Image (cartoon, rainbow, N blue to C red):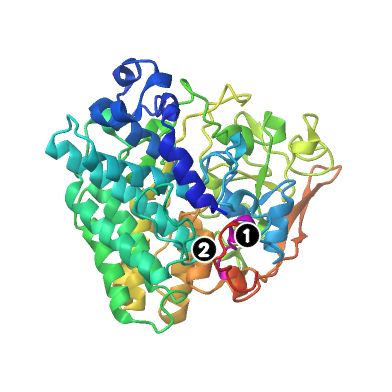
Amino acid sequence: MKSFIIDKYIKFGKRFLFIFVCMLYLTSCNIDDTLNTSPMDRISDDALWKDKALIETFITNTYRIIPNGFRYSFYNLSIISDELNARQNAWAWAAIAGNMTPDDLGQVDFWTSNDTPTNTNRNYWKTINQVNIFLQKIEEVPNNVDAATKNRMVGEMKAIRAFSYFNLISLFGGVPLITKPFALDDDFMVPRNSYKEVMDFVLSELEESIGLLPLEYDSKNKGRATKGAAMAIKARALLYRASPLNNPENDIQKWRDAANAAKAIIDLNKYSLFPDYRTLFLEENIYNSEAIWQRPYNQLITKEAAYIELSSYPNGYNGFGQIHPIQNLVDDYETIRGLLPENDPQYDPQNPYVDRDPRFYASILHDGMFWKGREVETFLPGGKDSNEGPVSGWNATQTGYYPRKFCNERIDNPSGNNMSQTPYTWFRYAEVLLNYAEASYFLGDEVTAREYVNMVRKRPSVNMPEITESGEALFNRIVNERRIELVFEQHRWFDIRRLKIAPQVMNEDFTRMKITKKPDGTKTYEILLWKEVNFKEPRDYLLPIPQSEIEKNSLLEQNPGY
């Protein structure tokens, strides 16, 4: 019986009718003329690969289907790490309790797809298949693409494929390494390649891409993978490769490689920290100085269901309030004195939201925060944004908080027809600085590690005290800086695993904040248990391969423990 991967290759290799949904709504690509060339349901395979504009459209559609942390996912990986709770997500609660099964990966099933609206844009094999088709056809079919353009196209597509394979091995471990479309007479049973084999392939592809891609594009082509984007994928991949999970022997050369890759981006002198952390991610600042690779959205043309505001806004602001930061995350935001609340003698647990890291206010909505014309009210009884609120109490937070990061507050009464165009940021410069700091730490260069962490902390809108620690305390500061700076950006799930701190982090029960408003108007704050969590070592370092795929392909071995 054919495996899902191969089955999809055959189906997609024969059907090119999907072009009509290409990135018309990606403002970075000028493809209006392409879409008006001829009826999209009559374009043949042969005609597609002979036409430069249609080839560009094929590439643009490949960008569209790369999985990201927004579309339909409600920050998928964040809700099975110590960042967010998602209401009515039994699969996520099972995952944090240590009970994820190969039969139900929920919204982190990046392997299979049923081609339903809610399952779109989560399958890396679709993206890989698109690239494999492109690389074969661009060589086989005579076309009117000049050499320079062809090189750029190949560079883009190889970077996308490398990024997809890197994410797959970071989630599942070794996966089948498939680099060409399958023919009907091919052997459909394929085993998993090792982590090393796939990683070596990823790095090789990225080296080629770096040599082929430009450093920047004109305004009509923003959003395409650049040389800097390929370098950023490489830097992250090498950091993960060097980390304890994948480098148990602590090969120092791997840390040198990671440090050198991050430093190469820094030495481009092209990127810089954007001054305002709060608006860094919003559509009005798309392609800013910090953005290395972003995925734009244009909801005005085609609704892509990012639904940032609708998913995140409190119920009292007519949002669905589907995701809620947990208290554990709030506790890890320092006070403005550079101390965790538990270590700051000036911190008052009955006035917990005073004098916190500015990134806390930029990322999380809390009770009493003045926002969009009034104070947020998650208190009980009767808070407008609590489960006793006058507007859909069912949509209320279950932890006492709502996310603010990525939300564009110009949106009132969010809906499927009223949402922002917040781009999804795959890579930004702050991560590169933190990657370099971490690699420097593991190389024993603590001076450099502190210097680059402090660069991030000194962003004008943040301006937190410099860190001065050494040894294990410095490591903990680096880890926490990534937690805070990169919150909700799909890093935390990977970070706690690759650094092998998940057994500690994910065995500390998740908590929530209960706020009670007394008749005299004063409030009391009480931290309560929210969910019991259980990290099963070593099983939970990787996701399980979906059982349906194991049953289809007997050569696929399941990850241990599932």
User: Label 2 sits on what residue type?
Assistant: Phe
Image point 28% across, 40% down: which residue? 137
N-terminal-most mark, 2 or 1: 2
Name the element at disc 1.
helix
Q: Residues within 10 Å of mark 2 (few under 14, many from 20)?
A: some
Residue 551's label in the rendered image is 1
Query: What quarter of the picture does the N terminus occupy?
Result: bottom right
Name the element at disc 2.
helix
Nearer to us of marks 2 and 1 is: 1
Residue 550 in magenta?
A: yes
Residue 298 in magenta?
A: no
Image point 27% across, 57% down: which residue? 205
Task: Tell me where the magenta segment starts and ends, as one range.
Answer: 541-551
The Cα–Cα distance between marks 2 and 1, rounded to whole angstroms, is 17 Å
Inspect this view and state whether residue 427 appears. yes
Image point 40% across, 57% down: which residue? 165
User: Label 1 sits on what residue type?
Assistant: Glu
Residue 412's label in the rendered image is none
Q: Nearer the viewer, residue 494 or 371?
A: 494
Horizontally, residue 331 falls left or right of residue 454, namely right
> In the image, residue 179 lies at what x, y percent?
35, 54
Looking at this view, name the residue that lies furthest to the front.
185
Image point 42% across, 70% down: which residue? 194
Q: Nearer the viewer, residue 385 or 424?
A: 424
| 171 shown above or below 151 | below
Q: Residues within 10 Å of mark 1 (few under 14, many from 20)?
A: few
Residue 172's label in the rendered image is 2
The quadrant in which residue 549 appears is: bottom right
Looking at this view, name the residue that lies furthest to the left.
147
